[in-house]
Amino acid sequence: MTYDLSELGIEKDLQYECITTTMSKDGVKNAGAFAFIYLGDDRVHCHIFEGSKTLKNILDTNEYVVNITQDPLVFTYATLDCLDDEYYTTDSDIAIIKDTPAYIIVDVENVEIKTPENFPIKGDNSIYFIEGKIRELIINDEHAQAYNRGMSVLIEGLVNFGRYKIVDETRRKEYMDILIENQRVIEKVSDEKTKKAMADLRAEYEKN
């Protein structure tokens, strides 16, 4: 089956931040903030470093749920691994965030283990590349939109631009380093319009 995720603001091959919820074999629900990539048709991808509860549950159960939300508390508590039971629906066989604007249930079909040598974060832990098939797409809010962090780092660059022109050389270098890193993020996760905006912004930085 082919799914159209464009109504959720999701474009093929771009990266979006979401809350991945899973359930252990013992029925314990868990949430983590992980990136999600739509590969087209009914195919999806995520990659997770080894050692997380989310990864263990996915490997044990071969399923997970992508919750499309921009709730700051949900993102924070999921990242800190302290999302209480009150945040989940009462379903006993699957973990879904309560009142989430939209969610996607994914069946895992392929897992590939890779080393982190080509990732910006280096370490000893392996990365699991997980590909799956959309089992079900539920949209509870017609205004639901997936979150792409490229816009956030672009805004950070725009805010810093006014400061960049008036600070000393040491601080200017700090702002430029931030901009370069943010441009790397945008090149990886964002659409062409955001990439162009960041490229134009960097050109203005370099003029000053």
Image (cartoon, rainbow, N blue to C red):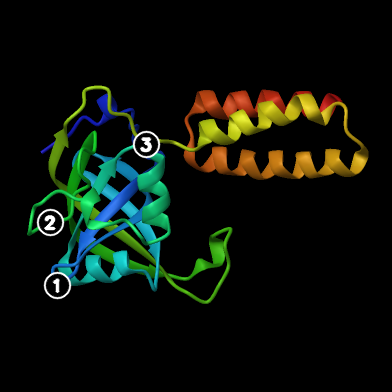
Seen from the viewer's position, the closer of residues 60 and 1 is 60
Q: Residue at x 32, y 56 (%)?
A: 83
Residue 47 location, x and y as percent? 38, 58
Vertical comparison of 100 with 19: above or below: above
Q: Amino acid at mark 1?
A: Lys
Q: Helix, strand or loop at disc 3? A: loop
Q: Residue at x 63, y 41 (%)?
A: 182
Can the viewer see residue 12 in this picture?
yes
Chain-order first, disc 1 or disc 2: 1
Is label 1 in contact with label 3 (beta carbons under 8 Å)? no
- On screen, residue 165 versus residue 138, left or right, reads right
Binning the other alpha carbons within 10 Å of mark 2 as few (below 14), some (14 to 19) or many (20 upward) gives some
| CA gap, disc 1 and disc 3 | 28 Å
Is label 1 in contact with label 2 (beta carbons under 8 Å)? no
Is label 2 in contact with label 3 (beta carbons under 8 Å)? no
| Residue indicated by mark 1 | 25
| Residue indicated by mark 2 | 94
Residue 121 location, x and y as percent? 57, 62
| CA gap, disc 1 and disc 2 | 11 Å
Residue 21 location, x and y as percent? 25, 55
Q: Amino acid at mark 2?
A: Ile
Q: Amino acid at mark 3?
A: Gln
Q: Helix, strand or loop at disc 2? A: loop
Seen from the viewer's position, the closer of residues 44 and 91 is 91
| Residue indicated by mark 3 | 70
Q: Helix, strand or loop at disc 1? A: loop
